[in-house]
Amino acid sequence: MIFKTQVSNERAIEVVSQIKEFSGNWRPNQTNAFELYAKAGSDWKKIDQSKIVYKEDWHETWKDMPQKTIKYIRDLPEFDADTFKEITGIDIEKTDKVEIIVEGNSKWISRESAKTLNLI
């Protein structure tokens, strides 16, 4: 599911792949565990569990999400602003989207892009 919308496995994989591509090295880490993991030579067994620090504010972990990732997520046809805000604490609105069909494939693009391409 993407934002409470049932999608195919292929669609889910496509979206996750794009989010990873747009996000680069950024991840919403709730703890410093991955930092400790890297320092321990990528061996979870070598990490001193007492040194793991948990962030108190879940939304704090999302505040540095790359803008291109936010834009991609916001432009998904499955996007739901309320769910996104509930998870991340980031308040964004869905852009005005239109669906176009090219060679039998459905794509959602911004109304502005569709006008520029003379599709509407």
Image: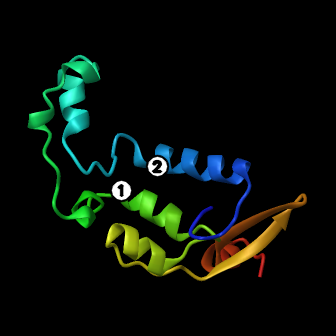
| On screen, residue 72 above or below 113 | above
Amino acid bearing label 2: Phe
Residue topped by disc 1: 66
Q: Say which quarter of the image contains residue 40.
A: top left
Q: Circle 2 — which element?
A: helix
Amino acid bearing label 1: Pro
Task: Please name whichever residue, 18 or 5, is drawn nearer the observer in this view of the structure.
Answer: 5
Task: Measuring from the top left, give residue 109's x and y in whole percent.
Answer: 66, 70
Query: Outermost residue toward the right?
Result: 104
Task: Measuring from the top left, give residue 119's x and y in whole percent.
Answer: 78, 76
Picture residue at 63% right of the left edge, 46% below the top: 13
Task: Measuring from the top left, give residue 84's x and y in whole percent.
Answer: 44, 72
Residue 29 as seen in the image, left or right of residue 11: left
Mark 2 and mark 1 lie on one chain; the one further toward the N terminus is 2
Task: Please name whichever residue, 64 or 13, is drawn nearer the observer in this view of the structure.
Answer: 13
Picture residue at 64% right of the left edge, 48% below the top: 14
| On screen, residue 56 above or below 108 | above
Q: Give neighbour class at mark 2: few <14, some 14-19, many 20+ (Cα, 10 Å).
A: some
Position of the N terminus, as image quadrant, is bottom right
**Real-space CA distance between mark 2 and mark 1, rounded to the nearest whole angstrom:** 8 Å
Picture residue at 38% right of the left edge, 61% below the top: 67
Task: Please name whichever residue, 51 or 23, is drawn nearer the observer in this view of the structure.
Answer: 51
CB within 8 Å, label 2 to label 1: yes
Q: How many marks?
A: 2
Task: Please name whichever residue, 18 or 7, is drawn nearer the observer in this view of the structure.
Answer: 7
Picture residue at 51% right of the left edge, 64% below the top: 73
Residue topped by disc 2: 22
